[in-house]
């Protein structure tokens, strides 16, 4: 019975840690966000981490640098003047990517069996997260950024669904 009750606690802790890290980055900036995210990632790998999960965290860190770095350099974000920026974006924005990766095999694992729901979730929650974060952090977003983020996150979540989902293939169904 104890094993059954531990799973929901771990999933809720996973979600709560992500949300705490998100707020630390958006409201606390790069220094506070960096410290909190480093602690969350270390605890995540020690407590919940699956074998080789660190590769997912690293891959999403690289993906975030490529995606948001490119969008920042293209003028998608206008950060406050005193913001430390690397590759056109502050470290706190980049840290959100490996933080998101902590959800992939845990709190969001159920989602990958539903490709279109995953894509819809990415297309809506991704841009809403950027919009909320921008408002809280005083970041201006270019008018084109949210639609680009919607397409980007829909594709990311669809790719995750194809890689990690266990739903039966539609093409292979007999009529």
Image (cartoon, helix red, strand yellow):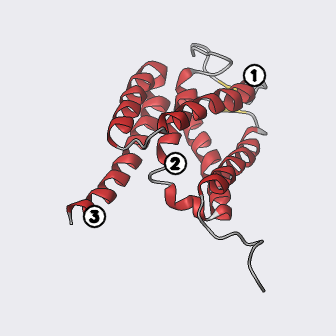
Q: Residue at x 41, y 32 (%)?
A: 41
Q: In the structure shown, which secondary structural element does the residue marked by tag 3 occupy?
A: helix
Q: In the structure shown, which secondary structural element does the residue marked by tag 2 occupy?
A: helix
Q: Which residue is mark 2?
A: 104
Q: Which residue is mark 1?
A: 73
Q: Is residue 129 left or right of residue 48?
A: right
| Placement of the N terminus among the 4 image quadrants | bottom left
The tag earlier along the polypeptide, 2 or 1, is: 1
Q: Residue at x 57, y 16 (%)?
A: 83
Alpha carbons under labels 2 and 3: distance apart: 21 Å
Q: Residue at x 76, y 83 (%)?
A: 174
The tag earlier along the polypeptide, 2 or 3, is: 3
Residue 96 visible, this orientation: no
> Residue 4 — which label?
3
Q: Residue 170 in the image: x percent, y percent?
A: 73, 72
The one of 120 and 127 positioned closer to us in this rendering: 120
Residue 140 visible, this orientation: yes
The one of 113 and 95 positioned closer to us in this rendering: 113
The tag earlier along the polypeptide, 1 or 3, is: 3
Q: Which of the 4 image quadrants contains residue 31?
A: top left
- Badge 3 crowding class, 10 Å Cα cut-off, few under 14, some 14 to 19, many 20 or more, is few
């Amino acid at each position: 019975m104890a094993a059954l009750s531990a799973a929901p606690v771990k999933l809720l802790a996973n979600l709560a840690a992500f949300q705490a890290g998100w707020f630390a980055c958006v409201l606390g900036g790069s220094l506070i966000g960096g410290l909190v995210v480093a602690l969350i990632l270390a605890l995540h790998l020690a407590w919940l981490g699956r074998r080789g999960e660190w590769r997912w965290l690293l891959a999403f860190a690289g993906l975030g640098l490529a995606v948001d770095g490119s969008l920042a350099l293209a003028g998608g974000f206008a950060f406050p003047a005193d913001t430390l920026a690397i590759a056109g974006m502050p470290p706190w924005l980049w840290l959100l990517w490996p933080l998101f990766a902590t959800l992939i095999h845990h709190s969001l694992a159920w989602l990958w069996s539903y490709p279109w729901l995953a894509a819809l979730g990415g297309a809506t929650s991704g841009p809403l997260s950027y919009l909320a974060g921008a408002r809280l952090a005083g970041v201006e977003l270019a008018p084109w950024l949210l639609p680009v983020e919607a397409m980007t996150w829909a594709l990311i979540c669809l790719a995750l669904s194809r890689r990690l989902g266990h739903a039966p293939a539609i093409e292979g169904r007999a009529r």
